[in-house]
Image (cartoon, rainbow, N blue to C red):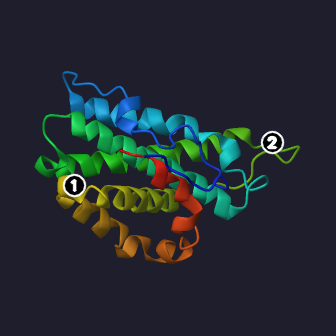
């Protein structure tokens, strides 16, 4: 079945109408959990280029949307990898929650480091970056949204993700992210099968 999406989304179109599992190399290595953690960071690394978060080039909304969409795709890839593992997330949700949290903190660190490295005292360079808490909340929201579609496999993990996302720690952030997580802004992801 063909999938028709609006082409006004700014995200990578190579995944349209394809099954993500067919595009991944998932491994049953000696330590598959460690391998999964490494894979998530490998997915996020190319999405952490300073230009995506430069508030001279992008609006704050666009910079945050870039973070959110990177995590939406990362969550889909996470699910595809978990399907390959012999034990699903229902058997070890705490470990998978930790892997997701580590990935979000890794991205927050990379964004800050790369934007800081691109700043130039004599010229415009990169300005501003997204706060660590905002990156973490966007990751929690993106993983919750994607894994909710596959909730039979991720029931316990979803409880942990949503509890963390809705905690008092992130309350102010959540209200400021309504436009970022608006489904219309990321409609392209409806066309990706995972």
Is residue 1 among the parts visible in the rendering?
yes
Q: Residues within 10 Å of mark 2 (few under 14, many from 20)?
A: few
Find the distance from the CA under tag 2 to the CA under tag 1.
44 Å
Q: On the picture, is 159 further left or further right than 58?
A: left
Tally the marks: 2
Query: What residue does disc 2 label?
Result: 120
At a point 28% along the width and 69% down the height, the residue shown is: 163
Residue 98: x and y, percent?
28, 48
Looking at the image, is 180 positioned above or below residue 71? below
Q: Residues within 10 Å of mark 1 (few under 14, many from 20)?
A: many
Residue 53: x and y, percent?
66, 50
Query: What residue does disc 1 label?
Result: 154
Where on the picture, by quarter, is residue 32? top left
Where on the picture, by quarter, is residue 30? top left
Q: Nearer the viewer, mark 2 or mark 1?
A: 1
Residue 26: x and y, percent?
31, 28
Residue 61, numbered circle: none
Mark 2 vs mark 1: which is more N-terminal?
Answer: 2
Is residue 181 among the parts visible in the rendering?
no
Looking at the image, is 163 positioned above or below residue 192? below
Residue 171: x and y, percent?
43, 76
At a point 33% along the width and 36% down the height, the residue shown is: 37
Quarter of the C terminus within the rendering: top left
Secondary structure of the residue carrying tag 1 is helix
In the displayed image of the protein, which residue is found farthest to the right?
Answer: 122
Secondary structure of the residue carrying tag 2 is loop
At a point 30% along the width and 34% down the height, the residue shown is: 36
In the displayed image of the protein, which residue is found farthest to the front?
Answer: 1
At a point 21% along the width and 25% down the height, the residue shown is: 28
């Amino acid at each position: 079945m063909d999938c028709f999406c609006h082409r006004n989304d700014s995200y990578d179109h190579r995944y349209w109408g394809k099954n993500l599992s067919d595009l991944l190399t998932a491994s049953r290595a000696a330590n598959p959990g460690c391998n999964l953690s490494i894979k998530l960071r490998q997915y996020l690394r190319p999405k952490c280029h300073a230009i995506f978060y430069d508030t001279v080039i992008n609006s704050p909304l666009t910079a945050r949307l870039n973070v959110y969409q990177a995590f939406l795709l990362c969550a889909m890839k996470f699910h595809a990898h978990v399907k390959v593992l012999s034990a699903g997330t229902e058997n070890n949700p705490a470990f998978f929650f930790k892997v997701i949290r580590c990935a979000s903190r890794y991205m927050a660190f990379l964004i800050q480091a790369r934007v800081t490295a691109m700043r130039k005292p004599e010229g415009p360079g990169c300005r501003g970056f997204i706060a660590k808490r905002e990156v973490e909340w966007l990751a929690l929201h993106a993983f919750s949204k994607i894994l909710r579609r596959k909730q039979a496999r991720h029931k316990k993990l979803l409880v942990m993700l949503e509890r963390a996302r809705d905690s008092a720690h992130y309350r102010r952030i959540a209200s400021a992210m309504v436009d970022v997580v608006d489904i219309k802004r990321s409609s392209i992801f409806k066309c990706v099968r995972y």
